Image (cartoon, rainbow, N blue to C red):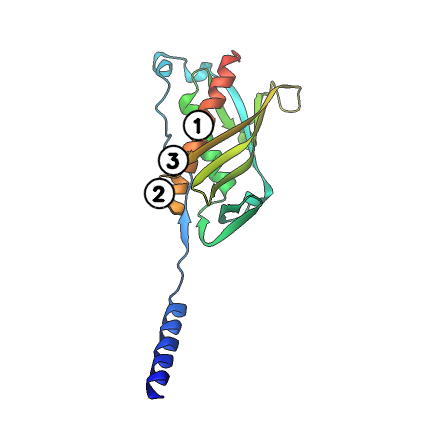
Amino acid sequence: MRIAFGCLLVSVLLLQACSSVPNTTQYYLLNNYQALDEPAAEAHLGVQAAKKRQVRVSLSLAEYLNQPSLVMQVKEHQIHYSLFHVWAEPLLLGATKSLLLDLNTQGRALSFIEARTARGEPLAYLAVQIDYFHATSDSRVILSGQYRFAEEEGEEILFAEPFTFEQNLRADGYEPSIVQMRHLVSNLARDLVSRLEAENL
């Protein structure tokens, strides 16, 4: 009887010890204030910044991404919001900074500015809608949505296209998924610059 009671007491104490360990919140930044790609080779030769055509960029996120928690897709139609792994700044802000940084690094003939801060004369307009931007339980990271381009905001859309980028995670955990998410933003920027400059805008 004493042995059984002793085992029960030890079990209760172990459970209390486990439950009393505080969970610490981890904070993550998508944007590290450095472009991931090297500038395009032609940029060194020279389109002067003043001669570049300016493009206003507006970024929007699907509603489920507009909250602090990191998101993981655990089943085909089910997502999980992490309680202790959160964004240090709103994802929309971090994604906008990252995208603009990479767009301007890659752009040879175009200069990209955030739509909200643009002032003065009407500018070409690029709207990017992100519908999926998260890790999955089968070790992938997804960035998917659509973009559209117009000569000016509110004008006729010259072209609109969907995009999807995906990478396998190289390691488990939230931190490796953030690294891969940042790479996907860089892939999107490269694709956008290539598409826009192919149109000789």
| Amino acid type for the residue under numbered disc 2 | Ala
Above or below — where is 120 with respect to 170? above
Say what secondary structure mark 3 lies in: loop
* Residue 148 image-quadrant placement: top right
**Who comes first in sequence, dot 2 or dot 1?**
2
Identify the residue shown where x is 41% and y is 69%. 19
Q: CA distance from mark 3 to mark 2?
A: 23 Å
Q: Quadrant of the N terminus?
A: bottom left
**Whole-percent x, y for residue 90 in the image:** 50, 44
**Who comes first in sequence, dot 3 or dot 1?**
3
Task: Point out which mark residue 120 bears.
Answer: none
Q: Which residue is mark 2?
A: 171
| Amino acid type for the residue under numbered disc 1 | Asn
**Whole-percent x, y for residue 163 in the image:** 53, 27
Relative placement, left or right, of 115 versus 7 is right
Q: CA distance from mark 2 to mark 1?
A: 20 Å
Nearer the observer, 79 or 65: 79
Nearer the observer, 121 or 39: 39
Say what secondary structure mark 2 lies in: loop
* Residue 168 image-quadrant placement: top left
**Whole-percent x, y for residue 124 in the image:** 57, 20
Above or below — where is 166 with respect to 82? above
Q: Which residue is mark 1?
A: 187
Q: Which residue is mark 3?
A: 33
Relative placement, left or right, of 124 versus 49 is right
Identify the residue shown where x is 45% and y is 50%. 86
| Amino acid type for the residue under numbered disc 3 | Tyr
Q: CA distance from mark 3 to mark 1?
A: 16 Å
**Who comes first in sequence, dot 3 or dot 2?**
3
Above or below — where is 24 with respect to 140? below
